[in-house]
Amino acid sequence: WQMCCALKEFEPFEKLPEDLVGSAKRFREWFELERPEEVPLPGDWKKLPDFERLLLIRALRTDRMNEALGSFVKSVMGEKYIKSQAFNLERSYQDMTPQSPIFFILSPGVDPVKDTEKLGKQFGIGFDQGNFGLVSLGQGQEPVAEKAIEVSYKNGGWAFLQNIHLTPKWTGGYLEKRCDDLETAHAEFRMFLSAEPAKLPINILQVCVKLTNEPPEGLGANVRKNWLPFSDDFFESSAKPGELKSITFALCLFHAIVIERKKFGPQGWNRVYPFNFGDLTSCAQVAMNYLEANPKVPWDDLRYIFGEIMYGGHVTDHYDRRLVATYLQAYMHDELLEGFEIFPGFKTPQNSGNTKDILEHIDTAFPQESPTAFGMHPNAEIGFRLMQADTMFSSIRELQPRGAGAGGGASVTEKAKTQLDDITEKLPDQFEMLDILDRVEERNPYINVFLQEIERMQELLSKMKSTLAELDLGLKGDLQITENMEDLMNALAMGSRPAVWEKYAYPSKRSLGPWILDLLGRHKQLNDWTGDMQLPKSTWLSGLFSPQSFLTAVRQTTARKNDWPLDKTVSQTEVTKKSAEEIAAATKDGAFIHGLYMEGARWDDKAGSVEESKPKELYAKMPVVLVKAAVFTGAEQKDTYLCPVYKTQDRGATFVFEAGLRSKASSSKWILGGVALLMDVA
C-alpha cells in the first residue's frame, strides 16, 4: 500500500490509491492470479504503457518481477536477450589464444575439468602426452602451479589452475603479473582458470574469456542429468540389478532435491553446502557393494552412510542434518523396490526396465515443478521469487550514479542530510543508569537481563548519535569527510543500515526506515520496564539483543525455586490462544513471550496445533507463548514438532532455541517444509 501511495506522485498513477479501494474486487481477482503479468490489468489500467505497467507489478506483485521484466525485454529488444546460450566449450575455445586464457566461474555441482580433458583429446593434449598440467590450488600448491604454467608457456601445452580464489595473495601477485605478460608465449600455450564467485584481480578478469556452466534449472532436468551417466553395464554387473536401479534412481532424485532446494534460500537450507556429482556416484557404488554383501537390502546401513557420511559429511547444521535424514527416511525403504508415489504426482519407475526406459519415464511422467515436490508449501515459491526480486533491485540501486540525480532528483548529500535530520530527531534520550541502579533492590536473573539490555541499547544509541553528529559537521564543511563518514552518508542516502552501527546492533534484515521504528519499539519496552522493574506481563522476546539470556533467566529462576540443577533444566513451550494485549498479568511459573512469526506453516488457534499455511501468507503471526523450565528426562515428546527458532529470515547462525509445538501431522512434514519460528520479519 505504501508503494502504491508513493506511485501517486507520478502523473499516470494519480488515482491509483482511490481506484484500488473503489475497484478492490477486480484488483483482488487480478492479484490472486498465478501469472498476473500475462493478463491485462483491471479497468482503464490495461491501457498503461509497458514500463508503467512494470511499476504497478513492482508495487502489487513483486514476486512476478523477473517474469514481467523478461517479457518487457523480449518485447523491446528481442528474444535473444532473455535466452541464455548453452555451455559449449568447443565454440568458446575458438575465441581463446595464448594471450587470452579461459576463466570458468564455478557453479555448485559443476566440474569444468572433464569438459576440458575431453576437448584436449581432440588436439592431442592430455596427461599421458605430458602436455596437460592440472593443479588444484590450496596450501603449498603455488610452486606446483607456477611450474605447470611456465613449462606450458615455454614448450606449448595446456595448464589448468583450479580454485584460484583459495590463494588470493598468490593470485593477486604472480598470476596477475603472468596474465599481464603473455605476449611471448608458445603458439600452442593455453591457460584455463577456475574459481568460485569471489573478489579477484580485475586484470585477470579483463584478459580472460569468461564462462559459466550453470547446472540445469528445474528438478526434472536435474534428475535426468544425474541419471544419464549410469549405464546398463553398471547395473548388470550387480547381483541385484533391480534393487540397484531403484536405489540409484532414488539417489538421483535426492541429489537433484538437495541441489535445487538451495533456491529457496534459508528456508531450503540453513547454510550453503558444496554438494557435488561425486557424492551421487560414490553413494551408488556403496549401494552396489552393500547389495553384494547382504541377502536383504540393508536400508538402515544405506541411510546412515548416505545421510551421515557421504552427503552428511558436507552438512554442519543440526537442522540441515535432520532434513537430510528425513528425506532419506522417506525415499529409502521396501516400497521403493515396487515403485511408489515418491512425491505428489510422481511415481518411481519400475526397476525391470533398462536405463533408457527409466530416462523415458523421467521425460514423460515428471510433473511440472512445484515446491510440493520438495515437501514444501506452494508459498515457498513466492518467498523465493521475492528474494530474487529484492536481490535484483538492490543490485540495480547500487549501480546507480552517486552524484546529483538526473532530471532534478536529490543528490546523495541531500538525501543523506534529510535522513540524518529525521533520525536525529527521533532518537530517544539515553537512560539514566545511576538512577536505575539505585532503584534495584535485588538483582534476580530477570533484572540482570534487562540491565544488560539497557547497557547494549546505550552503546548503540551513543554510537548512532556520535556518528550522525560527526557526519552533520562534515556535510556543513566543518570537518573533513572521512571514509567512514562517506560510507554512513551513502547508507543513509540508499536507505540501508549503516555498517558502522551493525557492530553495536542486533541481527536484522530490515531496511533503514523500518529498522529505526523497530529500534524505537525496543527502547520503549526497556523504558517501560524501568518504571516498576518487574517482569512484563508478556515480554517482546524479539525486541531483546540477547533473547537467549532471557530464556536462561527463566530456567535459572525456576531451578532456584525448585532446587533443580541448572544443567539438567530445559525450556518448554505452550502456545496460548491470547495476543499480548489480552495478557492480564505475568505468570508465576515461567514467562509469557510474544513477537514470533511462523514461516512454512501456521498455528491454528482452534485446533491448537501446527497446520498448513494459507495461500500467499508467508509469515503467520504466533499468539503469546508460555515458556517454562522443566527437568530434562530424555523422553521423546509425542505429537510434537521440535521447531527451531531464529532471530531473522537468514536462520543459520541466528538460532535461539527449540520450541516444542503440538502437531497432528508427522514431524517429517514440517521438517521437509522448512518450518521455523522467526523473531523478526523484514
Image (cartoon, rainbow, N blue to C red):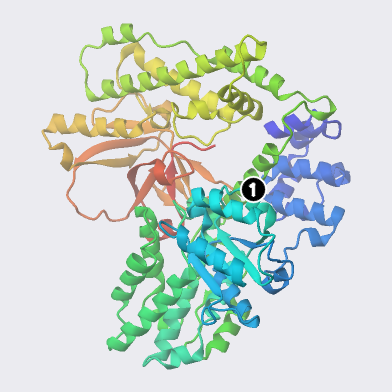
Which residue position is annotated with label 1? 202
Q: Secondary structure at mark 1?
A: helix
Q: Quadrant of the C terminus?
A: top right
Of residue 147 and residue 198, the one placed in the foreground of this image is: 147
Of residue 474 and residue 669, the one placed in the foreground of this image is: 474
Q: Position of residue 14 (x, y in %)?
A: 83, 30
**In-image side of 336 versus 309 (left or right):** right
Of residue 403 and residue 669, the one placed in the foreground of this image is: 403
Task: Specify whether residue 352 is in view.
Answer: no
Of residue 15 and residue 174, the one placed in the foreground of this image is: 174
Q: Amino acid at mark 1?
A: Ile
The correct choice, above or below, for 24 with respect to 613 in the image is above
Q: Residue at x 69, y 56 (%)?
A: 207
Quadrant of residue 194 in the image? bottom right
Q: Quadrant of the N terminus?
A: top right
Q: Position of residue 321 (x, y in %)?
A: 36, 59
Q: Residue at x 37, y 19 (%)?
A: 454
**In-image side of 343 versus 666 (left or right):** right
The correct choice, above or below, for 114 with respect to 263 in the image is below
Q: Residue at x 74, y 70 (%)?
A: 94
Q: Position of residue 326 (x, y in %)?
A: 38, 64
**In-image side of 121 versus 657 (left or right):** right
